[in-house]
Image: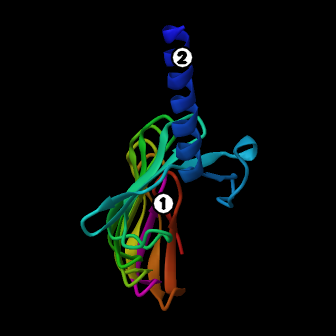
Amino acid sequence: MKKKSLFTAVILCFFTLTSFAQKDTIWFDSNWKETAKSKASYYRCHCVQKENGYWFTDHYISGAIQMEGLSIEKNAEVYQGVVKWYYENGNVFQIINYKNGILFGDRKVYFENGKLKSETTYKNGKIDGAWKEFYETGISFETGFYEKGEKEGHWKTFYTNGKLKEEGNYVFDRKVDIWKTYYYDGTTQE
């Protein structure tokens, strides 16, 4: 009889704790809108308070981590510092720096196989600085420079074999002057 009472108490305690834990879980659909667990693609467990904010961890419905980072607000995504997003296979998708919820600093994006896809810098939420984008093989796809979110200066694109494909200048995000296009064999067309 004592064993049956103890077993019942343990089961009751387990279900009580489980129900409280589920109240802290927020379920999201594929568009990151709150939804029921049965329709969810992602979920967020309760955030953990840190000395200078709240640690958010989002998961794919499979349980794999989808995102982790520090927010300075408990009920809003106002990120501070480095925030990482992941593919479901566990490889990093992107690493972004924030300052008071605004993109500020380096951003790196990766292919699902873990190779670098692009890297740039942000200031006050806008791309500002050198831009580099790569093919999945690691060969450069495009290089250039942004200033306050707009393409500026000399830009280049490359073929998959690494040879120059096109080059020219941007001013205020618009192509200007003469742009050179190179054939795959290396000859030029202007």
Q: Is residue 139 left or right of residue 36?
A: left
* Amino acid type of the residue that numbered disc 1 sits on in the rendered structure: Thr
Chief secondary structure of the magenta portion: strand
**Magenta region includes residue 148:** yes
The residue closer to the viewer here, 4 or 106, is: 4
Q: Quadrant of residue 61?
A: top right
The residue closer to the viewer here, 39 or 155, is: 39
The residue closer to the viewer here, 42 or 15, is: 15
Q: Position of residue 155 (x, y in %)?
A: 42, 74
Q: What is the spatial separation of the Cα atoms under label 1 and label 2, in whole angstroms?
A: 86 Å
Residue at the location (53% across, 58% down)? 183
Q: Which residues are magenta?
A: 147-159
Q: Which residue is mark 2?
A: 5
**Magenta region includes residue 27:** no
Residue at the location (52% across, 68% down)? 181
Q: Residues within 10 Å of mark 1 (few under 14, many from 20)?
A: few
Q: Is residue 11 above or below residue 50?
A: above
Residue at the location (36% across, 68% down)? 120
Q: Which residue is mark 1?
A: 187
| Identity of the residue furthest to the left in this view | 51
Residue at the location (49% across, 73% down)? 180
The nearer-to-camera label among 1 and 2 is: 2
Q: Quadrant of residue 12?
A: top right
Q: Is residue 126 above or below residue 15?
A: below
* Amino acid type of the residue that numbered disc 2 sits on in the rendered structure: Ser
Q: Is residue 161 visible?
A: yes
Decide which of tag 1 and tag 2 comes sooner along the chain: 2
Secondary element under disc 2, as helix, strand or loop, is: helix
Q: Is residue 108 visible?
A: no
| Identity of the residue furthest to the front in this view | 1
